[in-house]
Image (cartoon, rainbow, N blue to C red):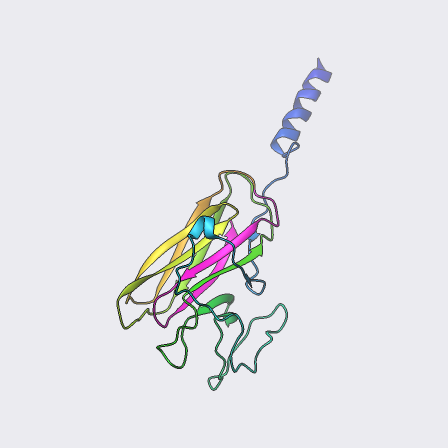
Amino acid sequence: MRSRVAIGLCVCILWSCGGTEAASSPGPLVDNTKWVWTTDGEELFGAPPPDSVCERMPIDCPEFPWPADECVEFEATSTCIASFVPECWPPFTVMAVYTRMPNPTIPLCNWITLEQPALRAIRAGDQVEVRMRHAPLNAPVPGKARMSFAIGDQIALDEDVLIPSDFDFLSNTWTAPRDYPAGTRLLFHVENHGANEYMLIEVNVL
C-alpha cells in the first residue's frame, strides 16, 4: 500500500513540476540591436504599394556602422539620416524608424519590415506584451500610419493611426495559441505617410 502511495506522489510531483514539458521562461523576446531589413511579411501585412520606398543604408552618417550590440546616441549636431536605428532611449534601447528627409518632398521610408529570431520559446497560453510609441504624426495631406508586430504566423499587435495625431504609446498583450520555439521569426512593420518617427520599445514574455 505504501509503495502505491509513494508512486502516486511521485507521479503528481512530476506532473506539477512539468515532467513532460519544459516550463515557460519569462523575459525579453527581442533584442532591439538585432533587427535587419527584410522583404518577408506580405502574407501578414499585404504587398507594398507601387510607390513604397525605404532607404536601407544611412546617409551622411558618421555614427554608422552602429556599434555591435549597443544603442546609438546621436549628438544634437548629427547629420545622420537613417530609416531604422537601435537608438538609446533610457532606460531602453528602442528600434526607431524614421521617415523624414531634409527635403520633405522626398520620402525616406514609407514601408518597412524588419525581422529577427525570437530570443526564447513561447508556450501555448503564454502572454506576450508588445509596447510601441509614435511621435506626433504630420503630413501635408491627411492619411494614416500602421504599426504591427508578428510572431511566426500570427500578428500580436496591429494598429492603424490617423495622421495628423499627437504622440502616443501603443501596447497589446497577446496570448499564444500554440507553442513557438526559440528562433521563431519575429517581424516589426511600419507603414507611413509624411515625415514621422516610430519606435518599438520592448516585447516580453510575461
Which quadrant would the N terminus be assigned to in this image? top right
In x, y percent, where is residue 78? 49, 84
Single out the residue that lies furthest toward the top.
Answer: 1
Q: Residue at x 61, y 31 (%)?
A: 16
Q: Front-most of 158 and 167?
A: 158
In x, y percent, where is residue 132? 43, 60
Above or below for 117 versus 180? below
Q: Front-most of 129 and 143?
A: 143
Q: Is residue 94 magenta?
A: no
Single out the residue that lies furthest toward the bottom.
Answer: 77
Q: Front-most of 8 and 192?
A: 192
In x, y percent, where is residue 7? 70, 21
Above or below for 6 versus 108? above
Which residue range is magenta in the image? Answer: 180-206
Left-right relation of 13 to 153: right
Single out the residue that lies furthest toward the right.
Answer: 3
